[in-house]
Image (cartoon, grey):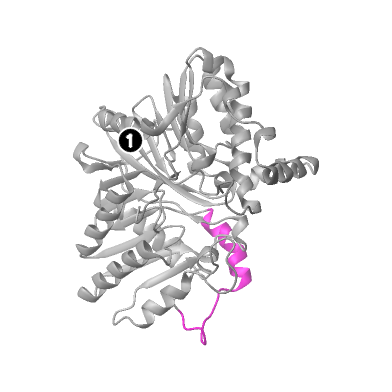
């Protein structure tokens, strides 16, 4: 499938690698300030905090200086209309959007996409900052921690691609399947006259999004980049690309994922890859680098059990593949850097095919969320050195596992975590939870 997959021709110098969240923020602000024609931003959320407000202010300034500028910001509808987990009352980010737009001389479009009728059933996980002919691609959302505004950061991947055709294709898909859809609504409406989408339109949106795709002038030869997207288990092109990357790899895989909980079909493909004598490097966040981790000295809440559940999934996989760890075929690298968190996603196969994506490569991404990614096919090897440099940078704060027993067991977890996980096992709910986490 990958050999036949069409893509957009790309010159070697058309890609730049940004290695830190502060570089991402600087690139975004510079690109927004210099925008001439269009800015389309798609992210899970644009937060009401210092960094989020700075990005929003930059967008408003760019619009004021150039009223003809086409500015569209798309975020998840449900995430924008609720506060942070644990916060009560009406405290969603949409209140900031409403206030800023009401005071603006030239308002911008900030739209909420209700991928499913409830947030836990699926969210807008579509990534990309498309500014004129440039695509800045990252799994990051827009807030303090993703942009390293203060002392903490959340580590992600950041790539800048200069391609007019790629930018046009991504804007067209957003306009056709999101902006123009009846279920997608403005998040800046006045409270008194606010009109929310009909429930029937929201329920049927997933069917329409399941047919969405990127359209572009393609080639099947040479160095190229292919935007792909997917929603749901059936006919999900992004999922198929992931499976085929693993299946067609001849020598090695380099995989990044923040939460190790692969869907069955992917776990089976990885196991076959190892049995065939090939190598896999997996970089996954330590449980303390999970964005849901709650330190023992802080008040515990149920959501804090998630990192431990992911850790047990990793331990189970490592135990099954201990033979491959011992002979050097399987290298599991745990990322940890102080109080910071890890959010990297993607797969490189044989140093020639690279998927950069916002997908967590887990059952939720596989079947519930609207996801996308960019597949780079490096026929000439012109980007191999840069990807290797990026991988070296990623591995800086990692420790390799030499035995599955290095991963903690349930007995060593804090008492509140043990209580919750024991209850989950007793109710046999772990199977269901693994499918939606």
Relative to 177, residue 421 above or below:
above
Secondary structure of the residue carrying tag 1 is loop
| 428 sits to left or right of 250 | right
Which of 222 and 367 lies nearest the eye of the viewer?
367
- Of the pair 19 and 125, the residue shown nearer to us: 19
**Image position, residue 178 (x, y; %):** 45, 63
Based on the picture, tell me whether residue 200 belongs to the magenta stretch: yes
Image x and y of residue 429, in percent: 74, 44
Residue farthest top in this picture: 327
Where 14 falls versus 411 (above or below)?
A: below
| Quadrant in the rendering for residue 115 | bottom right
Q: Position of residue 325 (x, y in %)?
A: 52, 18
Circle 1 crowding by C-alpha within 10 Å: few under 14, some 14–19, many from 20: some
Q: What stretch is highlighted in magenta?
A: 189-210
Nearer the observer, 99 or 186: 99
Residue at 20% x, 74% y is: 65
Q: Quadrant of residue 82?
A: bottom right
Name, please, the residue furthest toward the bottom: 192
Q: Residue at x 41, y 79 (%)?
A: 99
Q: Can residue 279 be seen in this view?
A: yes
Magenta highlight on residue 141: no
Residue 233 visible? The answer is no
Residue at the spot 62% in from the left edge and 34% down from the top edge: 313
Can you tell which quarter of the image residue 179 is in?
A: bottom left
Q: Quadrant of the N terminus?
A: top left
Residue labelled with disc 1: 220
Residue 277 x/y as whole percent: 50, 14
> Horizontal placement of 349 versus 262: left or right?
left
- The residue at the far front in this view is 297
């Amino acid at each position: 499938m990958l050999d036949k997959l069409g893509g957009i021709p790309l010159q070697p110098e058309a890609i730049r690698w940004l290695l830190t969240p502060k570089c991402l923020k600087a690139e975004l602000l510079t690109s927004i300030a210099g925008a001439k024609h269009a800015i389309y931003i798609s992210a899970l959320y644009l937060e009401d905090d210092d960094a989020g407000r700075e990005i929003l202010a930059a967008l408003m300034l760019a619009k004021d200086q150039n009223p003809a500028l086409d500015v569209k910001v798309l975020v998840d509808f449900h995430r924008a209309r609720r506060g942070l987990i644990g916060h009560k009352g009406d405290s969603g980010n949409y209140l900031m959007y409403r206030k800023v737009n009401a005071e603006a001389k030239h308002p911008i479009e900030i739209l909420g996409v209700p991928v499913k009728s409830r947030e836990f059933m699926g969210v807008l996980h579509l990534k990309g900052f498309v500014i004129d002919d440039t695509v800045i691609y990252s799994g990051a959302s827009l807030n303090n921690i993703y942009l390293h505004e203060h002392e903490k950061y959340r580590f992600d991947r950041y790539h800048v691609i200069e391609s007019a055709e790629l930018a046009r294709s991504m804007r067209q898909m957003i306009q056709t399947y999101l902006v123009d859809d009846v279920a997608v609504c403005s998040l800046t409406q006045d409270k008194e006259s606010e009109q929310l989408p009909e429930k029937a339109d929201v329920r049927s949106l997933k069917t329409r999004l399941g047919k969405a795709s990127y359209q572009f002038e393609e080639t099947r030869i040479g160095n190229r980049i292919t935007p792909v997207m997917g929603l749901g288990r059936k006919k999900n092109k992004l999922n198929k690309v992931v499976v085929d990357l693993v299946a067609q790899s001849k020598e090695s895989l380099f995989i990044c994922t923040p939460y190790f909980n692969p869907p069955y079909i992917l776990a089976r493909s990885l196991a076959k890859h190892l049995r065939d004598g090939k190598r896999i490097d997996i970089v996954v966040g330590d449980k303390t680098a999970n964005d849901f981790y709650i330190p023992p000295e802080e008040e515990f809440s149920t959501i804090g059990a998630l990192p431990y559940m992911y850790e047990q999934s990793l331990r189970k996989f490592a135990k099954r593949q201990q033979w491959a760890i011992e002979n050097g075929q399987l290298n599991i690298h745990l990322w940890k850097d102080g109080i910071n968190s890890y959010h990297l996603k993607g797969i490189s196969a044989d140093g020639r095919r690279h998927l950069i994506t916002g997908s967590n490569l887990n059952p939720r991404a596989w079947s519930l969320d609207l996801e996308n990614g960019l597949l780079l096919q490096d026929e000439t090897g012109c980007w191999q050195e840069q990807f290797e440099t990026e991988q070296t940078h990623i591995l800086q704060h990692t420790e390799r596992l030499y035995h599955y027993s290095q991963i903690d067991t349930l007995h060593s977890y804090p008492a509140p975590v043990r209580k919750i996980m024991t209850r989950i096992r007793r109710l046999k709910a772990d199977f269901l939870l693994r499918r939606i986490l």
